[in-house]
Amino acid sequence: MPGHKLGRVTEDIKRELTAILREIKDPRVRGCFLSIVRVEVTNDLSYCTVYVSTMEGMEQTKRAVDGLKSAAGYIRRELGARLSLRHVPQMLFKPTDSIEYGAAISKKLWELEQNRPQQSEEDPEEKTETEV
């Protein structure tokens, strides 16, 4: 199977999963800001690993993954109805803390920016004279 088809199917699955997640009524999934970080599909389209993350932290992500695992049959059926695939891959949901990690890095960068001393605007001619 050509690589571009696998990439296209992966993106289609990610797009449709995002829409399906909005429809799930499980409180473990609805009660958090859930994001699909990455989707990996095997070459034979038999398994699909979905990496999800939440802003609330790893514990909330693990609870959301439990909710997604219990709704895996519904999600797979909906994917089959929305995508024209001969075989809908089995969903494997994995928690990741990438959103929390990215937010922590952004916060640290912002704090460094705030703590950096302000450089005064010097006359460019004075700078060249002192450097020479």
Image: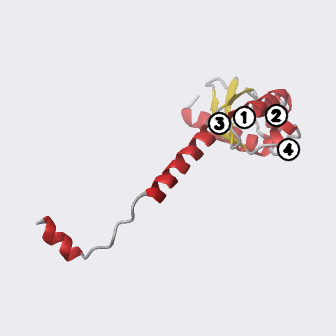
C-alpha span from label 1 to label 2: 18 Å
In the image, 68 versus 4, the foreground residue is 68
- Name the front one of labels 4 and 2: 4
Q: Which residue is mark 2?
A: 75
Label drawn at residue 10:
3
For disc 3, the neighbor class at 10 Å (few under 14, some 14 to 19, many from 20) is some
> Mark 4 sits on what residue?
23
Crowding at mark 2 (Cα within 10 Å: few <14, some 14-19, many 20+): many
Residue 11 percent coordinates (x, y) = 65, 41
- Disc 3 marks a residue whose amino acid type is Thr
- Checking the image for residue 61, the label placed there is 1
Which of the two marks, 4 or 3, is nearer to us in this view?
4
Pointer 1 or 2: first along the chain: 1
Q: CA distance from mark 4 to mark 3?
A: 20 Å
Q: Of marks 4 and 2, which one's residue comes earlier in the chain?
A: 4
**On the picture, is 47 further left or further right than 119?**
right
Q: Position of residue 58 (x, y in %)?
A: 68, 33
